[in-house]
Image: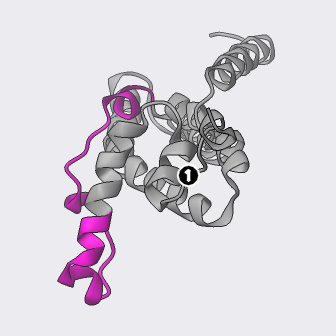
Amino acid sequence: MTEESAEPSEPRTEREKVALFIGRNAERYLRLYDEMIAFEDEEQAAKGRTFRVGDADFFSLPILLVAPLWLVYRKFYLWAAAWFLAIFVWDLITMNLMPEGVMSNAAFYGVVIGVSVWAALSFPIRYVKYARRQAKELAPDDLTRTGGASWLSVLACLLILYLFEVMLAQVIPSA
């Protein structure tokens, strides 16, 4: 057995580096990556058109159901913070400016469902594009550290949300 065969090989292609960055469920996202590469080889890219939601045969049910937690799981912390902040602000607006009852709840959940559908279609594409940029810029060791998925982050996020709710319950008296 030679020294070379004992060590794991370094990723050579962009596809291997993207897979290394994605980590868990990489094969699923690599199908989307392959679609992007095929698209770039076609006339569309020559015309300056970029790969968009309508070009992909990809939908993510986990993003649809729990988009902010998927963002945390995939280490998109700023996007997740913006998502939670937007929900919080929208909830404050509907609680204070809209009449009580069904209409304010319908408006709130309508927006949440609409944004979730948009996220389920667009975030996988954004994720693969981000992974491609990282694959070009980072060393293989940094790809695994920077990318991937983190259940620990999701648990920490849920704990922070719970503590935030407890704090709000103390500050805002219930009617």
Foreground: 132 or 7?
Answer: 7
The residue at the point 36 percent across, 38 percent down is 27
The residue at the point 79 percent across, 11 percent down is 170
User: Considering only vertical position in the picture, is 98 above or below 135?
Assistant: above
Image x and y of residue 175, in percent: 62, 10
Predominant SS along the magenta part: helix
Report which residue position mark 1 lands on.
11
User: Considering only vertical position in the picture, is 68 above or below 11?
Assistant: above
The reply to whether residue 111 is visible in this rendering is no
Left or right relative to 40: residue 3? right
Q: Is residue 39 magenta?
A: yes
Image x and y of residue 71, in percent: 55, 38
Q: Crowdedness of circle 1 by 10 Å Cα count: few (<14), some, many (20+)?
A: some
Q: Is residue 93 magenta?
A: no
Foreground: 138 or 57?
Answer: 138
Total number of numbered discs in the rendering: 1
Q: Quadrant of the N terminus?
A: top right
User: Considering only vertical position in the picture, is 129 above or below 170?
Assistant: below
Q: Residue furthest front?
A: 1
Of helix, strand and loop, which one carries label 1?
loop
| Residue type (three-letter) at the residue carrying disc 1 | Pro
Which quadrant holds residue 42?
bottom left
Left or right relative to 21: residue 142? right
The reply to whether residue 97 is visible in this rendering is yes
Foreground: 85 or 153?
Answer: 153
Q: Range of the magenta residues?
A: 37-66
